[in-house]
Image: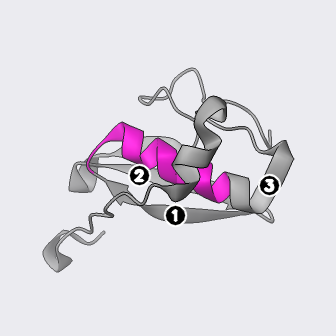
Amino acid sequence: MLNTGSRKNSRSQYKGVSWWAPVNRWRARITIDRKVVTIGRFLTELEAAAAYDRLASEHHGEYAKLNFPVITELVATHRPKIVEAPDWMSV
């Protein structure tokens, strides 16, 4: 199921974005060369979706399934702040 949209049972409406309850943050992940890569943890769902789009565009080019295809250029230049959990919250 490569290059598909968001799953129906997902808490997020965006591809590559999920709520990560242990740290109360949105997590963005992408599959590259059949390996899941965590992009980062974000305060908002939109920041996570933008980060996913940026990396998807870089790695998959014109074949990328983006959350915001109309504003690809803006997403590529926006750098949201990645929020990391404190050490004591590590899983």
Give the residue at x 75% y 34%: 4
Classify mark 2: helix, strand or loop. Answer: strand
Give the residue at x 66% y 38%: 66
Residues at badges 2 and 3 in contact (C-beta under 8 Å)?
no
Nearer the observer, 73 or 7: 73
Question: Which quadrant would the N terminus be assigned to in this image?
Answer: top right
Query: Which mark is drawn over residue 60?
Result: 3
Near mark 3 (Cα within 10 A), the count class, few <14, some 14-19 or many ≥20, is few
Q: Residue furthest right?
A: 63
Query: Which mark is drawn over residue 27?
Result: 2
Classify mark 1: helix, strand or loop. Answer: strand
Mark 1 to mark 3 CA distance (whole Å): 16 Å
Residue 43 on image: x %, y %: 26, 49
Figure quadrant of residue 65 = top right
Q: Is residue 52 left or right of residue 90?
A: right
Q: How many marks?
A: 3
- Identified by mark 2, the residue type is Arg
Query: Which mark is drawn over residue 89?
Result: none
Which residue, given by chain and number where applicable, does mark 1 sit on?
38
